[in-house]
Amino acid sequence: MEIAYLNGQWMPPSEAKVSVFDRGFMFGDGVYEVMPVYDGRIFTKAQHLARLARSQAEIGLAPVMSAEAWSTLLDEAVEKSGEAQALIYIQVTRGTAIERSHVYPDTPPTVFLTVTAFSPKTASEIQPLRVVTAEDIRWHRADIKVTSLIANGMIKNQALANGYDDAIMIRGDKVTEGTASNVFIVVNGEIITPPKSRWLLHGITRDEMIRAAADVGLSLREEDFDESRLSSASEIWLSSTGLELAPVGEVNDQRVGDGAPGPIWRQVFEGFQARKRLID
Ligand code: PMP
């Protein structure tokens, strides 16, 4: 059952309403978070709550509650939903202010969350993605998980309109990330992913894949690379909470390896599945 929480009240998602003067609506003035629930338990909860706290701090929004209070609230949300496999979406905005101003009002934040059923794909269900490269036209703080996703949406929808599944973004001479995912490549058997910076979201799944690669004894480097490395890579993957680890079969109409999910992808994917089973 889908459930929502809005400013202290539980309700069906369709009944959740905020004012049109909410700064989330007016200015995209808010942050969000998405975390997975596997077997009724929240995976990487502490990491997601730490990133939420960081996003809030970066936009100058005071903490709405302690990490412990968030943790209890999220556990309650999962229990109320009755969902064993789910995604929890949290949105925190700067709240409602009738006067339209760039100056931050002294209003309580809007706190909203939903729990939605989710079934991650199994290895045999996964189809390699066809992606295209696109200029990264976003702002200079892609590390903050802000609700205004307009540039990500524009790039993703342009890719879809051109017949691709997604886009990998390029800023200057560097590959940054997918429109809603982080990027990994395999070159000469070594896994490479761009380092954390202000140009990309510090994905929690990215961190987990780095740990999963270490768990299964693979070597991985966090290093910037340019677009030409995408065409020389034997494997390319996208990681996110919803995708977990998605292999890319084609980039810019050119096959990646033989186009099928690669052997290194399979090892890291399995390593990640093992980590999921270790939820404490
Ligand atoms: N980059 C962007 C732009 C994203 O939107 C997301 C997912 N929200 C990610 C990376 C992956 O982050 P995570 O692994 O924490 O879901």
Image: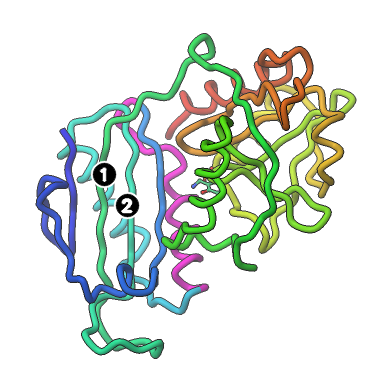
Give left or right: position of 59 versus 66. Answer: right
| Labels 1 & 2 near each other (Cβ < 8 A) | yes
Residue 169: image x %, image y %? Answer: 67, 48
Disc assigned to residue 122:
none
Q: CA distance from mark 1 to mark 2?
A: 6 Å
Q: Give the residue at the far front of this rendering.
A: 162
**SS under mark 2:** helix
Q: Give the image's coloring scheme.
A: rainbow
- Quadrant occupied by the N terminus: top left
Q: Nearer the viewer, residue 155 or 180?
A: 155
Residue 69: image x %, image y %? Answer: 28, 59
What residue is pinned by disc 2?
71
**SS under mark 1:** helix
How would you classify the magenta stretch by its main secondary structure?
helix
Give left or right: position of 31 versus 192. Answer: left
Q: Nearer the viewer, residue 97 or 133?
A: 133
Give the magenta-colored segment's residue range.
39-58
Residue 170: image x %, image y %? Answer: 73, 50
- Quadrant of res 263: top right
For badge 1, the amino acid type reads Asp
Task: Work out whether 180 lies above or below 188.
Answer: below
